[in-house]
Amino acid sequence: MARSALKRSDARPRILRTMAERARKGLVAGIDLGGTNMSVGVVDDRGRILGRSKRKTRAVEGRETVITRMVEAIDRACAEAGVSRPQLAAIGVGAPSAIDFDKGIVLNAGNLGWKNVNLREILSKRCSLPVAVDNDVNVAAWGEHVLGSGRGKGDMLAVWVGTGIGGGLVLGGRLWRGPLFTAGEIGQTILFPGCSPGRQTVEEHCSRTAMVRAMETLLGFYPNSMLREFTESKDRDAREPFDRAVSSSVIRECYSKGDALVRRVVDAAADLLGLAVANWITVLSIPTVVVGGGVTEALGKPFVSRVRDGFEEHVFPSTLRRVEVIASSLKDDAGVLGAAMLGRSAGASRR
């Protein structure tokens, strides 16, 4: 009896170890880290998000606060998924900066206030897990390539339209960062070199920030614009900046209802973005462009179609008009899922 009981007691730890090993092979955490918010997901080997956590980044409180909040968000997402952090195989992070991917260093994240921060090393020590760190749009591009609109489509350019504009490239089945880690930055390419500073780049004409700035400038010429309902409301704090009142959802509502000012600004931005995409595809000659980000999610098919029209007008040669220009299918989850897939590769390479 004693020997039988001992065997049973020995078997339970072995079963638990086996369960933990199975979990480690299947589960990874993906983190989409922004200057204002962070989003964390625990993702299984089929690309399903089993647990989530969203938190304010609180970048103004310093690096230690941000990293502590990242760890807490991982634990909350794990709790929702019904697992613990040690059961994860790895962690992947998308950060708003150029990244030295080989070393995991955040080179210059202005909206975090970070410069040359070795996030991979710091987070790996805090969590005792392998960590991969890359640019936020790079990981979104990777998510779309592996699980989303770019799946099975080969080489692709990702263009993310939000507060700013970022890009990512997948070439030969791998993220292409370039030897200096900044490849894909379509938002910083020059459209109008003769214009004053702040009015030259793709980002300075086609991002939500640029669109709202143009709407604010032109509002006086459109006395019947719906925007006045949101920016001149009695309930609105007069000290609130114009761009806070005009969110992506406000732009969507005004655009869908045919507001002349909003349509003029958005369509012009989409046309210019299509021109920029055409320039890149003329150079790269790759078959797929995935357009995502908050503005794209808000405006949907009409925005992407307008970008495509601008692309077709300018791309060379005309045979490249057959290139697909399509919307992100993962939407807000692209960053989390792409970071998780990147983390999975890091975990596999270090086991």
Image: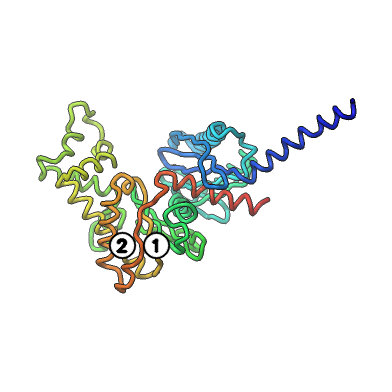
Secondary structure at badge 2 equals helix
Cα separation, mark 2 vs mark 1, equals 15 Å
- The residue that appears at 46% across and 39% down in the rendered structure is 39
Residue 78, how many percent across, how many down? 56, 35
Q: Position of residue 1 (x, y in %)?
A: 89, 25
Please name the residue that numbered disc 2 is placed on. Answer: 276
Q: Is residue 67 visible?
A: yes
Residue drawn at x 53%, y 38% is 50
Counting other residues with Cα less than 10 Å from the Cα at mark 2, is it few (<14), some (14-19), or many (20 or more)? many
Dots 2, 1 in contact, CB < 8 A: no
Up the image or down, 256 lies above or below 232; here it is below
Count of number-bearing discs: 2
Amino acid found under the numbered disc labelled 1: Thr
Can see residue 118? Answer: no
Q: Is residue 139 above or below residue 20?
A: below
> Helix or strand or loop: what does disc 1 sit on?
strand
Q: Residues within 10 Å of mark 1 (few under 14, many from 20)?
A: many
Residue 188, by quadrant, is bottom left
Above or below, 230 against 94 in this view is above
Q: Earlier in the sequence, mark 2 or mark 1?
A: 2
Please name the residue that numbered disc 1 is placed on.
288
Q: Nearer the viewer, residue 37 or 291?
A: 291
* x and y, in percent, of residue 2 in the image: 89, 26
Which mark, residue 209? none
**Callout 2 amino acid:** Ala
Measured as percent of width and height from the top left, residue 193 is found at 26, 63
Q: Mark 2 or mark 1: which is in front?
A: 1
- Residue under the image location 21 percent in, 26 percent down: 235
